[in-house]
Image (spheres, coloured by chain):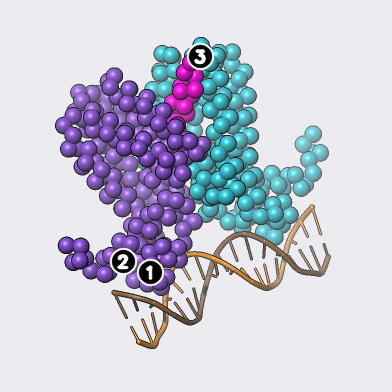
Chain colours: A cyan, B purple, C brown, D orange
DNA sequence: GTCTATACGGCGATAGAC
DNA sequence: GTCTATCGCCGTATAGAC
C-alpha cells in the first residue's frame, strides 16, 4: 500500500525527482543542492541525511534515468511484433518533441554532461545507453536481421539522438518529427 | 609577419584558445577563469582586461567554434564535386574519432552545454549548426536532390552528431568509424 | 597594459539542538 | 529523523599600484 511507505522513502523520492527534473532543465552542474531541497520542500541541511555528497545525487539521477528506460522497454515488450516495438520507441520519442526542443533528450543531455563531469559519474554514465542499444539490437535480430542487427540498432539510436540534439539546438520540434517520420518509413522497409 | 602581432592580440588569442580547449575537455561550466589564465600563462586578474565577464569568454568560445566550422567548409568547397565535399566532411569527422571518444564532438557537446547555460549564451549557441546544415543542404541540392536536400542534410548531420554522442558515451571510436563508413556508402548510393 | 591583493557572494558540507 | 545555523572554500569580479 502507498500508506506503508515511510516518510524517509518519500522524501528521498521527492529529492531524487527534483534533482532529475532540475538536471534536465538546467543541467546537473548548474543545479545546486539548495534548489533541489527547495523544490522538494525539504530544508537544505536535511538533504545530507539522504545523500552523503553531491556526487551521490548525481548517481541517483543516473540510476533513475536507467530505471525509466528499462521500464519503458518492458512496456514495448508487450507488443507482439519486434518491428512494432521499435516503431513504438520511435513514436514515443517523437511524442516528446516539445520537451526535447526545450531541454534536450533526458538521457542524451545527461550522458553528455556526466561524461564531462569526470571521475565516478563519468564512469557510471557510460552504461546509460548500453541497455537501450542491446534492446534495439534484440528487436532487429528478432526481425530476422541476424548479421547486421548491431549496425541497425546503432543507426537507429544515433539518428534519434542526433535529431534530438539538433531539435534542442534549433529549438524546433519539427526536426525530431521529420526524422521520426523518416525512421518509421525506414523501419518498415527493412 | 608573425612578429607584427601585438602582445595584446596574442594574449587574447591564447586565452580564447585555452578556454576553447578546456571547455571541450571538461565543459564550460566546470572550467574556471583561473584555469584558463593558468593554461595561458596569464595572471588571473589580467583576464578581465580582455573579457569583461565570464559570459564574454563563453561568447568567444562559441564564435571561435563557428569560425573553425566555416573555415573547414571553405576547404571542402575547393573540391569540384559536391558529393566529394560531403564525403570529405564525413571523413574528417571520422578522422577525429579518438578525440571524440574522449571529449565528444567539439560543436555538439558545446551546443548541448550552452543550451542549458540559459540566457545570452543559449541564444547564441542556437546558430552553431545553422551554417553547417545550410552548407550540407547546398551540396545535396548541387547533387540534384532538389526536393529533399533539406531532409538529406538533416539526416546526415543528425546521424553524425548522434554517432559522436554515442562514441563519447561508450568511449569507443569504432562507433563513429562504423557509422562513418555506412554514411559514405549511403552517400554514394544517392 | 600588466599584475597583485583582496573583496564579495555562493555553494558544499558539518555541528549540534530538538 | 528533522531542522537551523554556520563554517570554510572557491570562483567571480574589483581596486589600485606599477
Magenta: main secondary structure equals helix
Segment tinted magenta in the rendering: A146-162
The verdict on residue A24 being magenta is: no
Give the Cα distance between marks 2 and 3.
57 Å
Residue B120 vertical position relative to residue A123 in the rendered view, above or below: below
Q: Which residue bears the numbered disc 3? A: A146
Q: Residue A10's x, y, as percent?
A: 73, 44
Q: Are marks 2 and 3 in contact (CB under 8 Å)?
A: no
* A25 or A125, nearer to the observer: A125
Give the Cα distance between marks 2 and 1.
8 Å
How many marks the image carries: the answer is 3
Q: Are marks 2 and 3 on the same chain?
A: no
Q: Which residue bears the numbered disc 1? A: B42
**Label 1 is found on which chain of the structure?**
B
Q: Residue B80's x, y, as percent?
A: 16, 32
Q: Secondary structure at mark 1?
A: loop
- Could you say which quadrant of the image residue D16 lies in? bottom left
Q: Are marks 2 and 1 in contact (CB under 8 Å)?
A: yes
Q: Secondary structure at mark 2?
A: helix
Asked if residue A171 shows in the view, the reply is no
Q: Which residue bears the numbered disc 2? A: B11
**Which quarter shows the N terminus of chain B?**
bottom left
Label 3, residues with CA under 10 Å away: few <14, some 14-19, many ≥20: few
Task: Please tell me which of labels 2 and 1 falls first in the chain.
Answer: 2
Q: Residue B163's x, y, as percent?
A: 43, 33
**Label 2 is found on which chain of the structure?**
B
Q: Secondary structure at mark 3?
A: loop
What residue lies at 20% left-to-right and 62% top-to-bottom?
A: B2
What residue lies at 52% left-to-right and 54% top-to-bottom?
A: A30
The verdict on residue A150 being magenta is: yes
What residue lies at 35% left-to-right and 55% top-to-bottom?
A: B61
Amino acid at each position: 500500500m502507498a500508506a506503508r511507505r515511510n516518510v524517509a522513502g518519500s522524501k528521498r523520492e521527492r529529492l531524487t525527482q527534483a534533482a532529475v527534473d532540475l538536471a534536465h532543465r538546467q543541467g546537473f552542474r548548474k543545479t545546486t543542492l539548495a534548489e533541489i531541497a527547495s523544490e522538494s520542500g525539504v530544508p537544505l541541511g536535511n538533504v545530507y541525511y539522504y545523500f552523503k555528497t553531491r556526487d551521490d545525487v548525481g548517481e541517483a539521477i543516473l540510476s533513475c534515468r536507467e530505471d525509466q528506460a528499462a521500464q519503458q522497454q518492458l512496456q514495448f515488450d508487450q507488443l507482439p511484433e519486434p518491428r512494432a516495438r521499435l516503431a513504438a520507441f520511435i513514436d514515443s520519442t517523437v511524442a516528446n518533441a516539445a520537451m526535447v526542443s526545450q531541454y534536450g533528450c533526458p538521457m542524451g543531455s545527461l550522458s553528455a554532461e556526466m561524461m564531462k563531469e569526470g571521475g565516478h559519474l563519468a564512469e557510471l554514465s557510460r552504461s546509460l545507453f548500453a541497455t537501450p542499444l542491446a534492446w534495439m539490437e534484440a528487436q532487429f535480430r528478432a526481425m530476422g536481421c541476424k548479421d547486421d542487427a548491431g549496425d541497425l540498432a546503432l543507426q537507429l539510436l544515433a539518428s534519434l539522438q542526433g535529431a534530438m540534439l539538433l531539435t534542442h539546438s534549433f529549438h524546433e520540434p519539427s526536426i525530431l518529427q521529420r526524422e521520426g517520420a523518416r525512421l518509421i518509413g525506414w523501419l518498415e522497409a527493412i
